[in-house]
Image (cartoon, coloured by chain):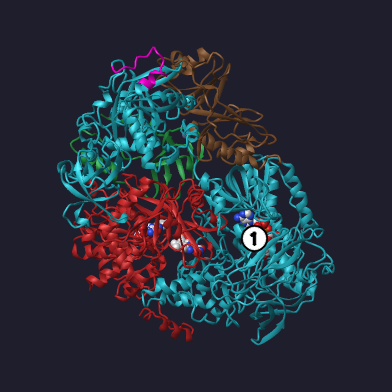
Chain colours: A green, B brown, C cyan, D red
């Protein structure tokens, strides 16, 4: 498997560290439902058999965290984004919403 | 007593390169190295500051630029290494850049954190290919290109200096001997028969 | 047509032709097989050389120990397996058909005793009615005890083929990565044309072929290309490719696996064809080949026919017979029967004739003779038997005849020493299925072709079902151009040379009815047709069940000559079609690969890199004993002459620190430089304790949690400036913590202005500890810096200079509990500073101390470390509960409050000392209430760390004990059955030295 | 009726008549309209569950539904190691029950699964690792499980061919469980299938469960590729597919599916007797009764349902092998494959009821579930029949993550790919 780091270019699997589902979002610690929310956030996974948005860390490369969209049945990668950009995007949307 | 100074020692404790026609291995340990990272939202300011002070543009991709013996090497998103010989007047890039870039970048001294090994000659590519998993073919990698990767399980920042070709590998200091050991093994195949 | 060969009269090799083939007759090589010396020529494989010498019996089968010979001429060989070389280089199960000979080669037959010719175990074949598929599962059950004692040892004694070497492999291996626009797998006519076509576009081309010589079946079949013998064409093609510097040809290189991301694994046998690998040259090289496009031109493998005694030495694949004649100049038999169900097989008669062999009969399973068959029979004047089958091969250790059943059903016995059989061809599509591609059945060619396969792949030649030479050449050229074109290189036209468009007509016959003798499907694993019958009867009808129940296709050849015959037979038995029945899944490697090649440089000492701390050289000179911690080699202790054991040394080091001063290299601790306007806010989210109030010039101890509320790491946080922090981590977690920080900075809180730089290696950091530490440091720290208690109090930090202007950092920290500093200088000065400090410290009786003494002192102070930070402890468990902020949001806050983690019953950190002070403590011991029985329900926790405390004069320990802090004064058992220990220990405060902590402040 | 009693006598009798007398090992059953219990998944656990349900809790109408061919999942692709050398109280009694069941399995099933207790040796390479193993060994002993802590000399005696002289990480000793060993993987599936079949269980292959039918919340049956099948109770034992099947009942599990690879070499004369695991790299190895070296290492590390891994892990594992036993350098790797692991968030399994009435869950086996097969089936059957957990499986609750009672042997935290 090779991942096209948006900064470094395409590199082999062994340069990266995997860190699971990128769709779960860290909840608000102050919310009254925080205990349940954090349990879900940390432990429950959809673990779909097809397309999966997931976090990878370019540990042997540029140290960027990445959001990779990958089909876990075929290992085909359709998209690689900078996690920082994704996170900032989501946060700004979040703000707009409220 | 306190002012006797201290002697710098090499990070390569067991240095015995094989003699290989077309391959030169050289340790570069008299450098001053500083890391710069743009402060949030200050990247343009940083670029401008570097441009005005040193007359070069910081590479926005894995690349290396040089001006008057001072090289800037891309080291990750919005991060660079500044590298130069220390020279007689013992240049110190941390001090120099902290003032030059105040308010636009955070600067840290890495002069000793990284050691640099220069690999050059017709054979350089044949040897590096045995540990470096990036494409170094001239069509894919040119002077001025940079790759952050690993060589034989050891993290390196690698760049090409010239067409000879000459490459430089920057690694964390404590790995120097292990990396050299691998490099010597990889080169042995081409060593002139003893 | 070439003129008939004569046998080389001058040669000691009875079956060697005096001309033809790619071997070099001008040089003779000598080798031994089972101790007997034979001769061959450069270009020979062990198999071709043995055949040249008339050797037919080469091995014994796995289960029945039946005599076996050479079936094929390639990597699909199931039978001719030998132990190659000897001693440290002994190589079991080496295919004689792939091993090239060199002067002095020695090979030994395997899996027989006492000799290949007379093998006692061949009684097994008498018992073959008992040793049927799956019989193990039905027996050896009574009495149960006898399984390990009797049955299994017997089975294991019989198991296995060759023997692995008893010693470490003395040869070296290496790995390399190659990148290509076009990778071409297979150097036969298709692959070579593809290479030419691609090379001419200036694309970067890599061509790999398993064999030493290129040309594939065009050479094997002695075909003509462009009106000339194939080998002449080959020479011109190789010359052009050699001239093109964008082309790399890897001979003796097997592409063994296709992996995700256009990545191919290939192994190059660099030195296996030599008597030894030259200095510095590896035995083999593992290639990771990353290719934009791939042309798979891997050809096809011939299928045996399934008839009685089809495993006898002398029964050979027709294509192999031609290979030996045309590639090696060896005729494997003098009186041959050709047995085929297809036209291509039939033409083997012509090859034999040309080689001067007599063809007794051409037995064709089909009712009418096709044009091709007629022509062959005509040209060669061979007797043609239509609708005929070889019911059985006659003979023991070599074929002496064939019982042929004619259309009328009567048996004709034909004398022969060779049966050349062809059951059709299976395209080598394995590499198309490694990442999930599915084969499809072709009803015309009666074989599986690649169905689905990765988009970057193009198939050409026989593997694509382009079975004739002409089609292979044109198909190869087209594929090569297309592949280059798709990678952005303008295709240039290539003229495809003329060649035969041989017929590929076939009418399958999957097995001969009522065979005369055992009819084998998988020869190496001794799976006969009757085993497939049995599997079907017992319900193992899925091909995957069939495989696992009978072990069909599981041998070193992975059933390349067996699988399709087997599933076709199963299809017949179950009345399903072949596509319905399906094909077993092929996995890498395509042919077996030495484990050493996968490891390359990274074995034994070079398994992982070794990280050396700044004082390493000095420590080594001073007789230091080192210890592996992660990748680091850390000084463990510094024995001095006359010290009887490590304990005496460590005790001395501890006493020196407690009474004078000691120096310890702590450079391996992770160090991270953190800057930015939000650095403080950022750290506040990562550490469980508050850091907002940390003043510039001060340090604070801090702890980090995982999001699940468990302790991840601890260390110190120093504030160097308004927006500048410098933190330390444990040696073990240095990398993990940086990764975690990057995660928090980039993913969780990207809005924060924070920059993270790992500075671990920048600083040579030494702990200078003990009452005399300041007196010592005073001698190196530049005078202008005040390091007095007043000027530099406990937990102070400052950027200073030493030895006349060398920049340094000073921290007033103590892990030992003594007054202590940590001093950091740029790592290049680390060695010199250590020497300087030791020199300057002489007058104070300084000593260097290592991780052992460090450990003793931290235990004496009740400081936690690795054994307490074991990934399952909470702050509260280790006595840090008070540090945890209850207000702020930080990683681990919420889940840290789950009831299970707050349970007062959880073992918590406390101190221990032996009731009998002379007794030794051991970590890993479990705690049992004094008068409770030692069993699971009374397990109250365990000892995490122990040390002999010089200050107390006895052993002390830290441990996690249920409600520990409430049990001070209680006496419990430290129960350690695996080391025969059972010690009464007293529960006491975990601080064994200077509980008030006065000393650190001085 | 499926096959006669197996014994050397029946084998000899059949030998005389060309083995024409053997019947199918299990009936190729067709689905009936409804069952008391439908077990989803014809792997080791599903088949064992069916067997113990029928044997200990019958009479019941039981079916095992397998989407492919039985034993085609992880039970048929694992490295066959069985042991009960666990650390935590939540685990030890369960795995020890399993070990005891293995010890009597063949006579119980009348099937030779080649349960072979030639020992499992975990090497340690540092004092800290030694003490951690001591802690584990002591925990085992407190539970009445056999454990021995060997020093280097004892290890040398046992496995002299390891790299003691030139190792990057010196071998200091090992934790040995003599009763540990290996079991012939396929035979476990076939043996349970045959024995369950004899007790009337329907084993239905090529029957994929595609959905659950629920009536006012409760499961009443399953939709399958072979039609609807009614069931009073439905029990999931689908290992790597747990999340997919649970999703059909709108459940999200504390599980990720990860690929683990395994490796086998060409068959060579046996020289490795028991199981050896490297403590300083990702490598463990044993030798099969056929002579193949069967070895493995670490997960590939990313979510996958593809049943195959990639080259970096192949290299990593072989590097471990060449670090520990460089004599295998010239031994050839014959085949490598992958299986889909149901990696739970703490590395320990779940055997529990679910929020959905009538649906029972057996999952989270990670790469340790083969050794668990008998106890898993035994305890799962108990839970299904009695609606209360078997006492040795009490800790395997689904809600343990919410309450903070994770069973984390390795201390890796909620990172499935690190367990
Ligand atoms: C490479 C490897 C090495 C391992 N090594 C060991 C080891 O040494 N020791 C050890 O103890 N454990 C080991 N394991 C783990 C062990 O194999 C598994 O934990 C265990 O086999 C899982 O239980 P099972 O046998 O029931 O799973 P499986 O055999 O996978 O059974 C699950 C079955 O459910 C079926 N299924 C899935 N979805 C559906 C559906 N919708 N409808 C119908 N059927 C369905 C599947 O087809 C499969 O047959 C290893 C695993 C692997 C992959
Ligand atoms: N007419 C027929 O029925 C028929 C049937 C089959 C083959 N043929 C003949 O076979 C030839 C087909 O030409 P081709 O080039 O397609 O096949 P080929 O067999 O001539 O060449 C294939 C080459 O690929 C190599 N190879 C295969 N797998 C490999 C791997 N994984 N790694 C490295 N090397 C590998 C083989 O060693 C061989 O040298 C023609 O000469 C044709 O006449 C004819
Ligand atoms: C313990 C064990 C031993 C094995 N031995 C062999 C073997 O000797 N030869 C072989 O070809 N495959 C062997 N295999 C691998 C199987 O062929 C197959 O790859 C594995 O069961 C996974 O199935 P799959 O590859 O069809 O997905 C073995 C598998 C296991 C679990
Ligand atoms: Zn990157």
Callout 1 secondary element: loop
D20 relative position to D213: left or right = right
In the rendered structure, does residue C22 fall within the stretch colored magenta? no
Write the residue at 74% across / 73% down: C333
Q: Residues within 10 Å of mark 1 (few under 14, many from 20)?
A: some
Left or right? Give the position of C759 relative to D331: left
Note whether residue C25 is visible.
yes
* Rendered location of residue C908, percent (x, y): 21, 42
What x and y, as percent, mark residue B29?
55, 25
- In the image, C594 versus C921, the foreground residue is C921
**Where C284 falls versus C693 (above or below)?**
below
Task: Kindly tell me whether residue D33 is visible in this rendering.
Answer: no
In the picture, residue C933 is in which quadrant? bottom left
Q: Main secondary structure of the magenta part?
A: loop
- Res. C339 image quadrant: bottom right
Indicate the position of residue B53 as horizontal and vertical percent values: 51, 12
Indicate whether C281 appears above or below C704: below
**Total numbered labels placed on residues in the image:** 1
Asked whether, in this view, residue C225 is left or right of residue C713, the answer is right
Of the pair D262 and C871, the residue shown nearer to us: C871
Residue closer to the observer: C188 or B186:
B186
Residue at horizontal 41 percent and vertical 48 percent from the top: D125
In the picture, the quarter occupied by the N terminus of chain B is: top left
The residues colored magenta run C775-789
Q: Nearer the viewer, residue D65 or C219?
A: C219
Residue that badge 1 annotates: C85
Q: Quadrant of ligand 1?
A: bottom left
């Amino acid at each position: 498997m090779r991942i096209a780091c948006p900064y470094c270019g395409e590199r082999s699997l062994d340069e990266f560290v995997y860190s699971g589902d990128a769709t779960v979002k860290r909840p608000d610690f102050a919310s009254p439902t925080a205990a349940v929310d954090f349990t879900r956030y940390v432990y429950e996974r959809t673990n779909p058999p097809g397309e999966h948005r997931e976090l990878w860390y370019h540990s042997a490369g540029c140290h960027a965290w990445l959001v990779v969209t990958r089909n876990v049945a075929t290992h085909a990668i359709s998209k690689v984004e900078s996690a920082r950009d994704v996170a900032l995007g989501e946060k700004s949307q979040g703000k707009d919403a409220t | 007593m306190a002012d006797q100074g201290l002697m710098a020692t090499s990070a390569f404790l067991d240095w015995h390169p094989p003699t290989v026609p077309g391959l030169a291995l050289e340790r570069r340990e008299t450098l001053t190295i500083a890391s710069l990272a743009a402060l949030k939202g200050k990247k343009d300011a940083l670029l401008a500051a570097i441009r005005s002070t040193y007359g070069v543009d910081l590479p926005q991709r894995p690349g290396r630029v040089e001006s008057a013996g001072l090289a800037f090497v891309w080291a990750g998103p919005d991060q660079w290494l500044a590298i130069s010989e220390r020279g007689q007047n013992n240049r110190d890039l941390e001090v120099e850049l902290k003032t030059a870039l105040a308010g636009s970048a955070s600067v840290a001294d890495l002069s000793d954190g990284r050691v640099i090994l220069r690999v050059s000659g017709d054979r350089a590519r044949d040897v590096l290919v045995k540990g470096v998993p990036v494409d170094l073919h001239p069509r894919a990698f040119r002077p001025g290109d940079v790759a952050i990767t690993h060589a034989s399980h050891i993290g390196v920042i690698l760049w090409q200096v010239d067409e000879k070709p000459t490459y430089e590998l920057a690694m964390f200091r404590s790995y120097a001997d292990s990396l050299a050991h691998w490099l010597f093994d990889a080169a042995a195949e081409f060593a002139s028969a003893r | 047509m070439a003129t008939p060969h004569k046998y080389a009269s001058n040669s000691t090799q009875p079956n060697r032709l005096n001309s033809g083939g790619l071997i070099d007759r001008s040089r003779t090589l000598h080798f031994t097989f089972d101790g007997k010396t034979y001769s061959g020529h450069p270009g020979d494989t062990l198999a071709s050389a043995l055949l040249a010498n008339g050797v037919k019996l080469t091995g014994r089968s796995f289960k029945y120990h039946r005599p076996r010979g050479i079936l094929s001429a390639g990597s699909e060989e199931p039978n001719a397996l030998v132990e190659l070389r000897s001693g440290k280089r002994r190589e079991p199960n080496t295919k004689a058909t792939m091993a090239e000979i060199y002067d002095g080669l020695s090979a030994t037959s395997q899996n027989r005793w006492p000799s290949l010719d007379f093998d006692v175990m061949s009684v097994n074949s008498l018992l073959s009615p008992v040793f049927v598929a799956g019989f193990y599962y039905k027996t050896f059950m009574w009495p149960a005890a006898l399984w390990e004692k009797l049955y299994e040892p017997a089975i294991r004694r019989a198991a296995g083929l060759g023997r692995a070497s008893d010693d470490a492999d003395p040869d070296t291996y290496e790995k390399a990565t190659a990148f290509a626009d076009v990778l071409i797998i297979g150097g036969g006519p298709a692959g070579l044309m593809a290479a030419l076509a691609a090379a001419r576009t200036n694309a970067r081309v890599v061509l790999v072929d398993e064999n030493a010589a290129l040309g594939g079946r065009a050479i094997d079949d002695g075909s003509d290309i462009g009106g000339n013998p194939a080998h002449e064409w080959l020479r011109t093609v190789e010359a052009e490719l050699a001239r093109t510097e964008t082309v790399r040809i890897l001979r003796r290189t097997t592409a063994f696996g296709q992996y995700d991301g256009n990545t191919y694994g290939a192994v190059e046998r660099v030195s296996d064809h030599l008597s030894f690998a030259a200095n510095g040259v590896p035995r083999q090289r593992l290639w990771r080949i990353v290719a934009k496009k791939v042309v798979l031109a891997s050809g096809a493998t011939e299928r045996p026919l399934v008839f009685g005694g089809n495993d006898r030495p002398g029964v050979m694949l027709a294509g192999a017979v031609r290979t030996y004649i045309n590639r090696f100049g060896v005729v494997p038999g003098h009186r041959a029967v050709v047995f085929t169900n297809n036209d291509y097989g039939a033409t083997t008669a012509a090859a034999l004739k040309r080689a001067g062999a007599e063809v007794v009969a051409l037995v064709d399973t089909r009712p009418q003779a096709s044009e091709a068959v007629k022509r062959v029979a005509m040209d060669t004047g061979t007797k043609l038997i239509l609708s005929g089958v070889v019911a059985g091969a006659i003979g023991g250790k070599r074929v002496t005849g064939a019982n042929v059943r004619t259309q009328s059903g009567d048996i004709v016995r034909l004398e022969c020493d060779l049966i050349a059989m062809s059951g059709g061809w299976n395209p080598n599509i394995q590499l198309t299925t490694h990442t999930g591609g599915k084969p499809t059945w072709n009803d015309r060619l009666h074989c599986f072709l690649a169905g689905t396969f990765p988009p970057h792949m193009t198939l050409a030649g026989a593997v694509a079902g382009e079975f004739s030479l002409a089609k292979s050449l044109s198909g190869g050229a087209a594929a090569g151009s297309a592949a280059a074109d798709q990678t952005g290189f303008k295709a240039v036209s290539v003229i495809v040379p003329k060649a035969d468009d041989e017929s590929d007509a076939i009418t399958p016959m999957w097995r001969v009815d009522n065979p005369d003798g055992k009819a084998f499907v998988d020869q190496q694993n001794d799976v006969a047709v009757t085993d497939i019958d049995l599997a079907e009867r017992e319900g193992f009808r899925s091909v995957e069940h069939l495989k696992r129940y009978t072990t069909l296709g599981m041998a070193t050849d992975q059933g390349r000559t067996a699988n399709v015959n087997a599933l076709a037979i199963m299809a017949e038995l179950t009345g399903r079609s072949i596509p319905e029945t399906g094909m077993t899944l092929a996995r890498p490697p395509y042919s077996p690969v030495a484990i050493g090649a996968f490891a390359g440089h990274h074995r034994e000492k070079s398994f992982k890199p070794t990280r050396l701390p700044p004082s390493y050289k000095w420590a080594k000179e001073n007789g230091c004993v080192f210890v592996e911690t992660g990748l680091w080699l850390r000084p463990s202790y510094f024995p001095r002459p006359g010290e009887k054991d490590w304990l005496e040394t460590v005790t001395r080091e501890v006493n020196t620190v407690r009474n004078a001063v000691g120096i310890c290299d702590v450079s391996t601790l992770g160090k991270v430089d953190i800057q930015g306007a939000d650095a403080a806010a950022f750290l506040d989210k990562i550490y469980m304790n508050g850091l907002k109030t940390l003043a510039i010039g001060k340090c604070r101890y801090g702890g980090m949690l995982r999001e699940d509320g468990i302790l991840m790491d601890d260390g110190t946080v120093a504030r160097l400036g308004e927006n500048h922090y410098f933190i330390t981590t444990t040696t073990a977690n240095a990398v993990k913590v940086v990764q975690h920080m990057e995660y928090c900075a980039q993913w969780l809180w990207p809005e924060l202005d924070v920059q993270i730089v790992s500075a671990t290696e920048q600083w040579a950091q030494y702990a200078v500890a003990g009452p005399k530490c300041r007196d010592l440091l005073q001698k190196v720290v530049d005078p202008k810096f005040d390091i007095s208690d007043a000027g530099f109090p406990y937990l102070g930090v400052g950027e200073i200079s030493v030895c006349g202007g060398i920049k340094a950092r000073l921290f007033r920290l103590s892990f030992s509990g003594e007054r202590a500093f940590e001093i950091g200088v740029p790592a290049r000065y680390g060695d010199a500073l250590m020497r300087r400090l030791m020199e300057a410290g002489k007058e104070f009786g300084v000593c260097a101390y290592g991780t052992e003494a460090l450990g003793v002192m931290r235990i004496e102070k009740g400081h936690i470390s690795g054994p307490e930070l074991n990934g399952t402890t909470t702050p509260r468990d280790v006595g840090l509960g008070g540090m945890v902020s209850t207000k702020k949001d930080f990683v681990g806050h919420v889940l840290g409050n789950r009831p299970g983690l707050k349970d007062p019953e959880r073992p918590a950190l406390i101190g221990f000392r032996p009731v009998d002070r002379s007794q030794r403590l051991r970590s890993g011991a479990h705690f049992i209430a004094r008068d409770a029985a030692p069993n699971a329900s009374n397990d109250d926790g365990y000892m995490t760390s122990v040390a002999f405390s010089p200050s107390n004069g006895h052993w002390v320990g830290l441990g996690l004990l249920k409600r520990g802090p409430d049990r001070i004064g209680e006496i419990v058992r430290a129960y350690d059955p695996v080391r025969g220990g059972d010690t009464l220990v007293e529960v006491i405060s975990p601080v064994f030295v200077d509980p008030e902590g006065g000393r650190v402040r001085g | 009726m499926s096959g006669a009693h197996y014994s050397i006598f029946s084998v000899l009798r059949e030998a005389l008549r060309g083995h024409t007398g053997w019947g199918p090992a299990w009936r190729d059953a067709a689905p009936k309209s409804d069952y008391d219990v439908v077990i989803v998944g014809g792997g080791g656990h599903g088949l064992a569950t069916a067997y113990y349900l029928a044997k200990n809790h019958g009479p019941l109408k039981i079916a095992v539904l397998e989407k492919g061919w039985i034993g085609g999942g992880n039970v048929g692709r694992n490295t066959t190691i069985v042991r009960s050398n666990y650390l935590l109280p939540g685990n030890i009694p369960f795995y020890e029950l399993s070990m005891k069941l293995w010890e009597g399995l063949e006579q119980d099933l009348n099937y030779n699964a080649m349960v072979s207790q030639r020992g499992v040796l975990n090497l340690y390479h540092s004092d800290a690792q030694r003490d951690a193993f001591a802690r584990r060994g002591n925990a085992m002993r407190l539970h009445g499980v056999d454990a021995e802590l060997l020093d280097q000399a004892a290890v040398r005696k046992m496995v002299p061919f390891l790299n003691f002289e030139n190792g990057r990480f010196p071998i200091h000793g090992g934790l040995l469980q003599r009763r540990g060993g290996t079991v012939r993987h396929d035979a476990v599936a076939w043996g349970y299938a045959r024995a369950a079949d004899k007790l009337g269980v329907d084993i239905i292959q090529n029957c994929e469960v595609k959905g659950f039918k629920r009536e006012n919340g409760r499961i009443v049956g399953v939709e399958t590729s072979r039609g609807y099948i009614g069931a009073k109770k439905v029990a999931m034992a689908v290992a790597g597919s747990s999340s997919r099947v649970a999703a059909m009942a709108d459940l999200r599990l504390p599980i990720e599916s990860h690929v683990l690879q395994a490796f086998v070499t060409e068959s060579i004369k046996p020289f490795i007797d028991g199981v050896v695991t490297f403590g300083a790299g990702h490598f463990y190895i044993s030798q099969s009764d056929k002579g193949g070296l069967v070895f493995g290492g670490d997960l590939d590390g990313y979510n996958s349902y593809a049943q195959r891994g990639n080259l970096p892990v192949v290299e990593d594992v072989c590097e471990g092998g060449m670090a520990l036993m460089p004599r295998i350098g010239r031994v050839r790797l014959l085949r490598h494959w992958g299986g889909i692991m149901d990696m739970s968030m703490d590395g320990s399994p779940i055997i529990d009821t679910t929020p959905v009435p009538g649906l029972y869950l057996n999952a989270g086996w990670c790469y340790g579930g083969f050794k668990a097969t008998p106890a898993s089936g035994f305890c799962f059957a108990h839970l299904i029949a009695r609606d209360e957990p078997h006492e040795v499986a009490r800790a395997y609750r689904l809600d343990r993550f919410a309450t903070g009672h994770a069973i984390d042997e390795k201390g890796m935290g909620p990172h499935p790919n690190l367990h």
